[in-house]
Image (cartoon, coloured by chain):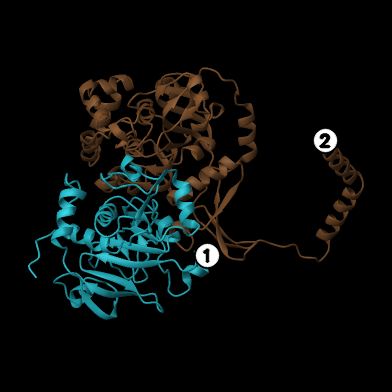
Chain colours: A brown, B cyan
Amino acid sequence: MDQADHLGKRFAAGGEGTGEELVDSTLELAGEAVSPEVVRILESGIGDLIQPVDLEAFRAWNRAKSKRLEDKRMSEAEAVRRFVRDGDYIGTELYGTVRCPMSLVHEIVRQGKKDLRVAGQGVLELDMLLAAGLVKALDLTYIGLEVYGLSNCLRREVESGRVERCVEWSNASIAWRFQAAAMGVPFIPVRSMLGSDTLKYSAAKVIECPFTGAPVALLPALILDVGLIHVHRADASGNAQIDGISGFAPELARASRRLIISAEEIVETEVIRQRPDRTTIPYYLVDAVVEAPFGSHPGEMCYRYERDEEQIRRWVEASKEPETAAAFLQTYIHGVADHREYLALFGEDRLARLKCKAEGGVS
Amino acid sequence: MNAQPYKPSELLICTAARLMEDGTTAFIGTGIPMLAASLAQRMHAPNLVPIFEFGGTGAILEHLPLAVGGGCTFHRAVAASGIRDIVETAQRGFVEYGFLGGAQIDVYGNLNTTVIGDHDHPKVRLPGSGGGNDVGSHCWRTIVIMPHDRKRFVQHVDFITTPGYLTGPGARERAGLPRGTGPYRVVTTLAVLGFDSISKRMQLLATQPGVSADDVAENTSFELLLGDRVEENPPPSAEELRILREEVDAEHLYI
C-alpha cells in the first residue's frame, strides 16, 4: 500500500511539473535538425492485406461481448444464419481430415454464404467451400488433399480467376498472425518467409530489427470475422476443451470477433470446473455452441473416432470434375436438412465401426 | 549382389531412413518422410524423435498417419502441443532435420510448391507453402525427397516457396534467415545430392543402384557439381524391405 501510494504521488507530481517540460522539449526536438531514429523497411510484400488490422474496433467489439455464463446452444443452421455473413472473413480449424468443424462447413455451403474471404489452411472443408464457389479471396498457406494430392477445386477456382486474390503465407505464419490478434498487437516479428517469393506475394514486411540490425519479418495481425472450431467437449456457454494436439485453436479462438464452437459432447459446467486447466477456449470468446457428434466426419477425432477413408476417397474422386463435385454436394449437403440427416446417410453401424477403431487412443 | 526387386518409392524411403540419426529431432511430414522415420525407428534409430507440425512430439510410429495432425502423429508421444510450439521450437534451434518435398528444385535447393507459371495467372495452382517454408527456414539441416527428372530439377524454380541457398553463398544470412541452416541433402530416385560448402551449388554425392552419374546429369536441367568421390548406394536390404512391407506399411497405404 505504502509503495503504491508513493508511486502514485510521484506519477501525479510528474504529470503536473516535469511532464509539461517533457512535452515542450519533444516539440522542440521535432522542429530542430535532430533527426529522429527511423526503422528501415527492407521489403514489402505485394499481396493485399485482405482483412484490415483494426485493433481499436476489435477491443471495442470484445468489450461489448456478453460476459455472462449463458446458454448459447443452437443448431448449425441458426449459428450460421446468425453469425456468418456474405463477404465475411472466416477461418476454420484444424484440417479437413482432423478435428474439423465439418457440420458447420456443410451448413455454410447449404446456406450459400458467398464472397467469403478465407484463411486458407485446409483440406476437405475448404475444398467444399471452393467447390461451391463461395470463396472470393484467400490468405493461402495450404489447400490440398494431403496423401491424395493436389486439390482440383483449388486449381479450378484459382486458375479460372474466380478466386480473385491469393495472398501467400506459411502455415506457422497464419497461426502467428492469429497470435498477434490474440495478443492485441498489430504485428508479430518472425524469421519464417524471409528471402522467399512466399514473402514477396504476402502482405508481410521485412524491417531492419531495431535491436539487432538483422532483417526480420513482420506479420500483420489477422482478426477473423468468424472462427469455426470443433472440440471434444464444451458446456452450454462455450467453455471448450480439446483432447490431443491443439493445432492452432487457442490462437484462432482469440483472433475471432464471432466464434462458433461445435462439440462432440455438451457437458455440465461442473465438468469444466473440475478440470479448468483443460479449458483452452473460455466461454466469453464464444457466440454459439453447437452439439455435433461425429462433427468432424469424414475426418477423425482423436480418442473418439477414426477417419472414414471410404468417404474421403469418394470426395477425392468426386472433386476431380465440377459436375461430380456438384453431385456430391447435392447428395451430402443440399439433399439433407442438417447434420443428423447427414449422419443417417451412413448409418449407425458404420459410425460405430469408426469408433471401435479409435479405441485405445490410436486414431 | 542379388537384390530383391523394389519399387522407386521403397528406394526413396530406405535411402531417406538411412540419413536419419538416432537421438536427433526430425520435423516429419506425411508420406515418404513418415515412412522413412518409422523404418529408421525400427532399424538403427530407436531414439529418433519425430516432430509433427500440428503438435506431436516423440511419437512411437506404430501406425501410419495419413494427415500431419492425425492421431498417429502423437501416438504414445511425449507431448501434444500445437503448431506454434512446434515451429517456435525449430525457430529457437532445437530441430536438427527437416524433411520436405516439392514440385521443382533449383541448383541452390530453392523449392517450389506454390505455382507453375505466373503467380497471378498460374498454369497449375499447387497447394502452397504449408509448413514447408517454416521447416526450410528454421531446421538446421533440410533434406528434400523428390522424384528426379528435368521438369523438377530446373534452372530456375517458378516460385521460391521455401528458401534453399537463394542466390548463393551468404544469401540466406543476408535475408535474415537463421545462420548455419539450409538444404543438406536431396534424396531422389536417381541419386543422393548435397551442396558444395563454398558455392552452395548442388553436387552429386552418390548414385542409386544401377544409375550412372551421366544418367543423373541427363535428368537435371542445371549443371551438377561432382563430389570428390561419387559412390553407388547399396540397394535396400532384405531386412529393410521386410520391415517396410510387413511392419511399417503392412496395409500398403503408400507402397
Q: Are marks 2 and 1 on the same chain?
A: no
Q: Amino acid at mark 2?
A: Met
Q: Which mark is on residue B176?
A: 1
The amino acid pointed to by label 1 is Gly
Tag 1 subunit: B
Q: Is residue A269 above or below residue B209?
A: above
Q: Position of residue B175 (x, y in %)?
A: 51, 66
Residue B171: percent from left, percent from top: 47, 71
Q: Which residue, as the protein is rendered here, is positioned at the far right? A: A17
As drawn, which residue projects farthest toward the left? B2
Q: Secondary structure at mark 2?
A: loop
2 vs 1, front mark: 2
Front residue of A169/B22: it is B22
Considering only vertical position in the picture, is B212 above or below A8? below
Q: Are marks 2 and 1 in contact (CB under 8 Å)?
A: no
Percent coordinates x, y for residue B18 in the rendering: 26, 63
How much space separates mark 2 and mark 1, taking CA atoms? 47 Å
Q: Is residue B162 visible?
A: yes
In this picture, is B136 found above or below A353?
Answer: below
Residue B41: percent from left, percent from top: 28, 54
Chain containing the residue with disc 2: A
Q: Quadrant of residue B220?
A: bottom left
